Amino acid sequence: MKKLIIFFFIFLFSIGGSFGVEVYQEKNKFGLRENETIILDAKYKKLIRLGENAFITLKGNKYGVVDKKGETLIDFKFSHAARVLGKYVKLKNSKGFGLYDEFGNVIISQDKDSIELLFGGMFLVNKNYKYGVVDMEGKQLIDYVADDIYMPKPNIMRVKYQGEWYEIEQVTASTLTLPSDVKNIKENEEFKITKLITSPVAASKYSLITTADYSIKIFSSISPAYEATIDELMLSQGAEAVSIFMKIGWLPKFPVVYLKNYFKILRNPTNGPLSNMKEEIKQDL
């Protein structure tokens, strides 16, 4: 019994001594420390753990990534950041979205219109209004050639290519896992591939909603384009909110950047005010 008690205390001591890097707060700012040793001074607005190796960090108005030793893995030059699955970070700047792992490695390059998580450990990626699929190691499974991609069920993917809908179903598993040579995928005992016959009624509804959606977007895109332009030109300079208007270097660029953002939002087929209705109708196509 005595040996057991001694072992228990040794175990507790070893846990306390190896707790590792932690976030601490001081004057409403955050830093990193390990066993009371300061690794990063508390001068950051946010520190969000990324996997076991790094932290998403907000410095001024820009996001970056630092590792647990306090070294910068990804420079502070991004206006938005979102943690994905706990170990990936999606970052946005004026070029678009990119995806990185906890070691700062590029998984998806920084030029995408959107990056969303799919079933089966895959990402749906939009580039120049065409869709593709990338796995978690960054390997391109489907090139950016599809007009639309969605998964009505975890083991089914529907792809719209050159005006036609195709369905890939993995019949041997509850979650779809696309092979690395998906270009050569053929129907077999594992996969069922179907060319879908579009319902005329549903197709008519989808076309009508798409037309109405575009018409509404002509007006509804004005405000989002303005916000995107302010974000790109003003916040990109790293100014604090109080002093943003003191830096007017962004002013001459405003009309050009605004028009670029306006037409980018207008052309994007997935962000309209009726996009939810379009998604519901797709289930009936």
Image (tube, rainbow, N blue to C red):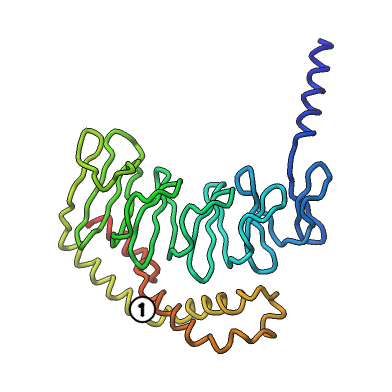
Quadrant for residue 64, please give it. Answer: bottom right
Q: Is residue 160 placed above or below 266 in the rendered structure?
A: above
Query: What residue is at 47 percent from the left and 78 percent from the top?
Result: 225
Front position in the image: 29 or 52:
52
Q: Residue at x 15, y 62 (%)?
A: 200
Query: Residue at left 75%, top 37%?
Result: 19
In percent of width and height, residue 234 lies at: 61, 79
Residue hosting label 1: 216
Number of numbered callouts drawn: 1
Viewer-closest of 196 and 58 = 58
User: Which percent across, then down, holds residue 219?
Assistant: 40, 82
Q: Residues within 10 Å of mark 1 (few under 14, many from 20)?
A: some
What is the three-letter code of the residue carrying label 1? Answer: Ile
Quadrant of the rendered structure where residue 218 is? Answer: bottom left
Residue drawn at x 24%, y 49% is 167
Quadrant of res 211: bottom left
Front one among 139 and 246:
139
- Residue 184 falls left or right of residue 219: left
User: How far from the left and from the top, in percent, is residue 140?
Assistant: 37, 51
